[in-house]
Amino acid sequence: MFLYLVSIMALVHVQCEKIYTNKYDGVDLEEILSSERLLTGYVNCLLDLGPCTPDAMELKKNLPDAIDNNCEMCTEWQREGADQVMQYIIEHRPGDWEKLEQKYNEDGSYKRKYLNSKQKEGNSTETYDKDENKSKENN
């Protein structure tokens, strides 16, 4: 009986600590971000506008859940990578960011949370609201 209870507790513990696969954690994000062709391929995959590589398909499958749950099941590498990619796309490809946001996070809450956390860390000088106002002034 004791072994049965320990087995059940171990199973529950494993289920509670479920994370996304780390199979693609070694992907070279710098290479992707520095290549217009590669980055466009990933963006097109996420927007259902083109084919997906296996790692992009995994990202596409997990992205809605990761956004909804603040990346709770992400590995540390995935969290850091998400920050790096978000920062790059927000700063360098805002049109793509807007399309991705429309598909995956229409209310903009994830970007707002991201930019506000970066401001608290001292990595950003503007909050989401200021960023939005600046965009409105430019229109």
Image (cartoon, rainbow, N blue to C red):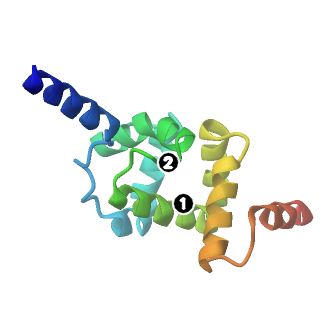
- The furthest residue to the front: 2
In the image, is 15 to the left or to the right of 2? right
110 w.r.t. 52: above or below? below
Determine if residue 61 is in view.
yes
Please state which of residues 118 and 92 is positioned toward the viewer in this rendering: 118
Tell me which residue sits at (47%, 66%) in the image.
84
Distance CA(mark 1)–CA(mark 2): 12 Å
Mark 1 or mark 2: whose residue is earlier in sequence = 2
**Which residue is disc 1 drawn over?**
86
Determine if residue 49 is in view.
no
Considering the numbered disc 1 on the image, is that residue within a helix, a strand or a loop?
helix
Mark 1–mark 2 CB contact (< 8 Å): no
Q: Quadrant of the N terminus?
A: top left
Tell me residue 45's x, y (percent). Answer: 45, 40
Tell me residue 20's x, y (percent). Answer: 33, 42
Tell me residue 89's x, y (percent). Answer: 56, 61
Q: Quadrant of the C terminus?
A: bottom right
Considering the numbered disc 2 on the image, is that residue within a helix, a strand or a loop?
helix
Rendered image: mark on residue 43: 2
Tell me which residue sits at (45%, 46%) in the image.
72
Quadrant housing residue 93:
bottom right
Q: Residues within 10 Å of mark 2 (few under 14, many from 20)?
A: many
Quadrant housing residue 58:
top left
Tell me which residue sits at (22%, 47%) in the image.
23
Quadrant housing residue 33:
bottom left
Please state which of residues 78 and 5 is positioned toward the viewer in this rendering: 5
Amino acid carrying mark 1 in the image: Met
Tell me residue 92's x, y (percent). Answer: 60, 67
Please state which of residues 46 and 36 is positioned toward the viewer in this rendering: 46
